[in-house]
């Protein structure tokens, strides 16, 4: 009887991990502080657009509104460093969404999933648009 109980407990643990029961914590990007403004109207408008479009897409995908976690940062790290930071999630059970374009010029658009939890990351080099630093937008939610 004890053997069956231990087996069921192990199976439950595996199911919970596969269904998003694992650790879905995401560390803040390197050299980041809370975002106020980039100093560029273009970048600030882009972030405002991302906030609207990303959330609408997550809602269509079935993400529950009460699980919404939205963060915006300003960082001195490069786009490549930001990409590397989020790519490291794949060693913690997350997988990168192939339909996202990734790093292209002055912009990074990527996404990750772990079980039922989704994460969208948008980053832009504000200095290319008259601002300063790298602005990072993240949106996380669970279905």
Image: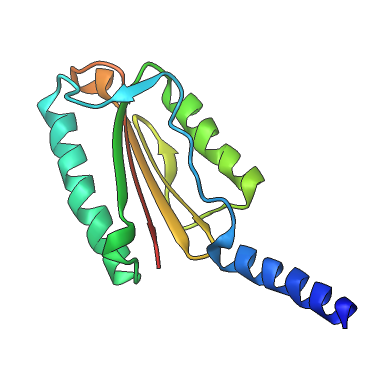
The number of numbered badges drawn on the structure is 0
Name the image quarter holding residue 21.
bottom right
Q: Is 5 drawn above or below residue 75 in the view shown?
A: below
x, y percentage for residue 82?
Answer: 46, 29
Q: Is 11 drawn above or below residue 91 in the view shown?
A: below
What residue is drawn where x is 18% and y is 52%? 52
Residue sitting nearer the eye, 33 or 130: 33
Q: Can you name the residue that lies furthest to the front here?
A: 1
Q: Is residue 59 left or right of residue 116?
A: left
x, y percentage for residue 35?
Answer: 24, 27
Residue sitting nearer the eye, 84 or 101: 84
Name the image quarter holding residue 103.
top left
Q: Is 45 drawn above or below residue 39 in the view shown?
A: below
x, y percentage for residue 80?
Answer: 48, 27
What residue is drawn where x is 37% and y is 16%? 76
What residue is drawn where x is 61% and y is 67%? 16
x, y percentage for residue 9?
Answer: 74, 72
Name the image quarter holding residue 107.
top left
**Colour mapping:** rainbow
Q: Is residue 116 left or right of residue 1?
A: left
Q: Quadrant of the N terminus?
A: bottom right
What residue is drawn where x is 40% and y is 68%? 143
Q: Can you name the residue that lies furthest to the left here?
A: 41
Residue sitting nearer the eye, 87 or 92: 92
């Amino acid at each position: 009887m004890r053997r069956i109980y231990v087996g069921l407990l192990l199976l439950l643990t595996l199911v919970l991990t596969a269904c998003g029961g694992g650790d879905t914590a995401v560390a803040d990007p390197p050299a980041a502080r809370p975002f106020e403004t980039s100093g560029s109207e273009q970048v600030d408008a882009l972030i405002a657009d991302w906030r609207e479009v990303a959330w609408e897409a997550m809602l269509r995908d079935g993400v529950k509104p009460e699980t919404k976690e939205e963060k915006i940062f300003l960082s001195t790290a490069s786009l490549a460093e930001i990409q590397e930071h989020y790519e490291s999630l794949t060693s913690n059970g997350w997988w990168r969404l192939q339909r996202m374009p990734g790093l292209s010029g002055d912009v990074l658009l990527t996404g990750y999933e772990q079980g039922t939890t989704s994460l969208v990351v948008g980053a832009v080099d504000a200095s290319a648009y008259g601002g300063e630093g790298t602005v990072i937008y993240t949106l996380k939610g669970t279905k």
